[in-house]
Image: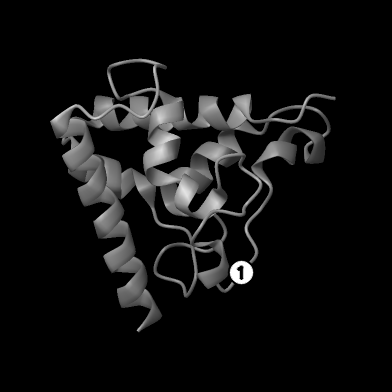
Amino acid sequence: MTRRILQLLTGAIAAAAIISIGAGVGLAQERDDHESGAYLYRVFCVVCHGDDGKGHGPASDTLRQTLPDLTVLSRAAGGVFPRDRVLKAIQTGGPTAAHAPGGMPTWSEAFARLEPSKGTAQKRLQALVDHVESLQAKE
């Protein structure tokens, strides 16, 4: 049951993204190509991780696990942003994949559905990683 709900949520978010990208709806004045990390974060991640990346998005209370504070990843990794670990988490759903109860969706699959070009999907993933890096707390 939880797996089906998570699949429906992932599908709904992807559908909303397709509609908003196709309609040209901008969420900010970052970059008009809808490929900026900030735009993608707002479309795909804010619902769980929140605007500030601290894990308090509107859907966070419905999840079985506490979400990580994305603003302290560098601090937790000795002051170096763990780019590869963040990329892997976005690609595969992190420690608990989407098929696990309450786990993070596997965004590489969603991005591949949005645009079949592997290069475009990889650019989106890298843009999201760059945005998460920009959320890091300043020491």
* Disc 1 element: loop
Number of marks present in the image shown? 1
Nearest the eye: 107 or 51: 51
Instruction: Write the residue at 50% across / 43% down.
Output: 88
Instruction: Write the residue at 65% across / 64% down.
Output: 66
In the depicted structure, whether residue 115 falls above or below residue 69: above
x, y (%) of residue 81? 69, 29
x, y (%) of residue 102? 49, 70
Which residue is identified by label 1? 65
Q: How crowded is the residue under tag 1: few (<14 C-alpha within 10 Å), some, or many (20+)? A: few
x, y (%) of residue 105? 40, 57
Nearest the eye: 132 or 95: 132
Quadrant of the image occupied by residue 43: top left
Q: Amino acid at mark 1?
A: Gln
x, y (%) of residue 113? 19, 45
Instruction: Write the residue at 57% across / 68% down.
Output: 61
Instruction: Write the residue at 29% across / 49% down.
Output: 109
Report the side of 38 relative to 57 (left or right): left
Specify the quadrant that holds the C terminus.
Answer: top right
Nearest the eye: 120 or 54: 54
